[in-house]
Amino acid sequence: MSGPGAGFEYPPTEVSWMKRDVLLFANTIGCTADELHFLYELDPNFAVFPTYPIILPFKKNTPEVIDFYAEQKAIKIPGVPDFDARRVVDGQRLIQFLKPLPPTSAGKKFEIRSKVLGVYDKGRPGTVVETQQDLVDAGTGEVYSRAIGSAFYVAQGNWGGPKGPATENFPPPQGKKPDFEFEDQTNEQTALLYRLNGDYNPLHAHPEPGKKMGFGGAIIHGLYSFNSSCHGLLQKLGGSDPANIKEFQARFASPVKPGDKLVTSVWKAGEMKDDYEEIRFVTKVAGGKVCLSNGRALIKVVGESKSKL
């Protein structure tokens, strides 16, 4: 870890959530009525959907709407240029599930502890800022989840920074048909509902930012597709049990527009890490481009979907 900005640690950010937040998140990523342990607070197995921590750096410690642009530029990374948050998209995300979240943060103090892993100048296309974000119980020091992600600042490169390392790829098994596929039909409200979790980037609500970035209008959060694909995998392979997923990652390859149908193709790679099997997946817009590539998960397979498209 070297280069401008690398190793910079942001001040710890206190975060909190209520049962209502957990219920909202599960509803907005596609959890279904046969998964009441994610959707009904009095279910004896009530649980937080595992990817929920991915929203906390946006939501922080407030139930109120947040000024996304102001928050993104609140703290400057030393040694690198100021980047324009009005032209930023997700690059890639990996989340590791280390300890189950309690249904509410009440009674504990949780923090997001973030550090910059690298800031990479990709020339004319833009700049990548890679960060690690740990969700930590400040009282005990226990880490509940670790997210490693990259933000891509569009057309904000050529400042003389390092190019950065090549990313590791996890393609589907060559020449093998998917073991199964599943669909997610989005609509005009998908992003407008998902943003209520705390990710209030105007790019996903109003057409103007998307037009300026060349998308033609509003696009759905990359993290919506990320979370909904994770839900589908856990539901189809892991019996909807949050204990049955250890890691999940994907690269954001192209935008998804409201109304697009997402089709996720899934391959069992056959490699085991303890009791968890490596799963590869690709999510496409039906009839169009790949929107999530480099998809990989570690899942304890307890059920296997037989559905084919």
Image (cartoon, helix red, strand yellow):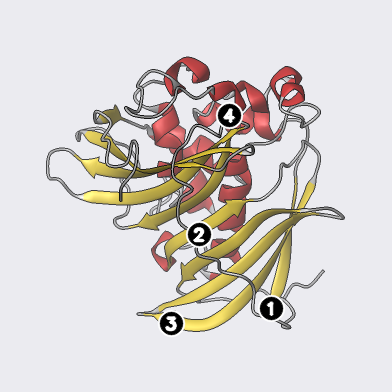
Q: Nearer the viewer, mark 4 or mark 3?
A: 3
Ranked by sequence position, the earlier of labels 2 and 1 is 2
Residues 214 and 190: in front is 214
Q: Hey, which quadrant is residue 54 in on the image?
A: top left
Q: Mark 2 and 4 residues: CB-CB less than 8 Å, in contact? A: no
Which residue is at the far front?
160
Q: Nearer the viewer, mark 3 or mark 2?
A: 2
Instruction: Name the residue beneath numbered marker 3.
Output: 272
Instruction: Name the residue beneath numbered marker 2.
Output: 167
Q: Hey, which quadrant is residue 14 in on the image?
A: top left
Disc 2 from disc 1: Cα separation: 26 Å
Residue 15 percent location from the top left of the image: 31, 30
Q: Mark 3 and 1 residues: CB-CB less than 8 Å, in contact? A: no
Is residue 308 left or right of 5 when viewed as pictured?
right
Which SS class for mark 1? loop
Going by the numbered disc 2, the residue's amino acid type is: Thr
